[in-house]
Amino acid sequence: MINISEVLETNKMILEESLDVRTITMGVSLLDCADASLKTTCDNVYDKLTTLAKDLVKTGDAIGREFGVPVINKRISVTPAAIVGSACCRTPRDFVRIAKTLDRAAKKLGVNFVGGYSAIVSKGMTKADKLLIRSIPEAMASTERVCSSVNVGSTKTGIDMDAVRLMGETVKKTAEATRERDSIGCAKLVVLCNAPDDNPFMAGAFHGVTEGDAVINVGVSGPGVVNYVLRNTCRGESFEVLCETIKRTAFKITRVGQLVAQEASKRLGVPFGIIDLSLAPTPAVGDSVADILREIGLEQPGAPGTTAALALLNDQVKKGGVMASSYVGGLSGAFIPVSEDQGMIDAVNAGALTIEKLEAMTCVCSVGLDMIAIPGDTPASTISGIIADEAAIGMVNQKTTAVRVIPVAGKKEGDTVEFGGLLGHAPVMKVSGFSCEAMIARTGRIPAPIHSFKN
């Protein structure tokens, strides 16, 4: 039973503490859209999306108004396009036609993004996978709302280093293809290890082949709420009090998401999938994971103790969330993107936070190196090395990790790049000048770790 004090408390979270439902994402299987004809495949994809998701935006907006909870984004994730187009695509340009079809459907529906222009290549690449990956630069340059992801490794299979090398080159080409817009195409492209099938957040969302025909996944975000509670109740308190406070707050945040998810599922006639309870920041003041780390006791994120503080935060968020919903999934934890978190930007500008420290932090949090601008002349092999490092962290630690770096064409260390909206702005960060080219030139796979053998 919900009492009046809980209602008032939730209202306060929304009005004063930046609580929102970051996204309602409808996952849609496109397996039944595949055909030997490219035109037929594209027609099937467009028709299915515009039929199944025709009421998604309207429903999300209505729930937001009626419940008083801001529902910021309405999105779609689809079956990895490399699978959908495997029978009909003969060239990279063929896959670009599928990307443009997804973009056209997204515009028709009014959704913010559609994710799933993806390939899953953790153990090897099919011909279709390679074609899709080579099509990514043009696809990102010629569409507005399509997001791309490539999964290059997993704990069970190891890391496909051929795919890692190819993705370093692809990131560079995508940056160049969108150089007139500060290489923003790379903001829609992420390389993952251990990618989940049910992630509602972009750019890594896709609808896994283990999922049903359609599903509703909801991502809740509340770093402002956690920061507010810690600032007003926990200064000088013990770690026990700190942890209990974060856990209880995460529980309340997740309950809001559960309510919205169940209502969206009912109104759309689509099964409820999961709640992703990630603390996803925005460039807005007061909506920052970095501010939470400061409230825990750090002068700046990047100071000694940062990794421990982030591990504590991530663990308590998960513990609180799993008590609030039986179906917690996706990524679920604390995001640490640079461009989307003003506190992280401030830490970089203060000299407290480097890519190397961010990499250490990814050992204990969600996702990985996210929305980081780097110099445009960074070699493709160096980007591949960064991808390999993050994939290794995910593979060994049995967790999802990712890389979304933006080698901004024409920009150098110390410059600032404006992306706008939720993508924010970013300082161009220093990248190691030492080469890993000879390592990246090797072919084959890094084997799965010994603890992957559990059969």
Image (cartoon, helix red, strand yellow):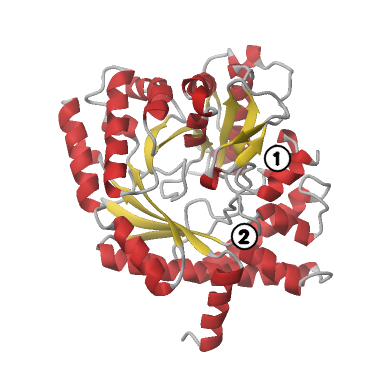
Q: What element carries label 1?
A: helix
Q: Which of marks 1 and 2 is nearer the N terminus?
A: 2
Q: What kind of residue is marked 1?
A: Leu
Residue located beneath label 1 in the image: 358
Q: Can residue 269 be seen in this view?
A: yes
The residue nearer to you, when weighing 446 against 406, is: 406
Residue 275 has which mark?
none
Marks 1/2: CA–CA distance: 18 Å
Residue 158 x %, y %: 53, 31
262 up-or-down from 425: above or below? below
Q: Residue at x 37, y 68 (%)?
A: 63
Q: Disc 2 marks which residue?
A: 223
| Secondary structure at numbered mark 2 | helix
Residue nearer the viewer, 392 or 451: 392
Relative placement, left or right, of 107 versus 438 is left
Image coordinates for residue 139, horizontal then vertical, percent: 38, 27
* Viewer-proximal residue among 327 and 370: 370
Q: Where does the image place residue 328, in percent across and percent down from the top left?
A: 48, 60
Horizontal relation, residue 21 to residue 297: left or right: left
How many numbered markers are drawn?
Answer: 2
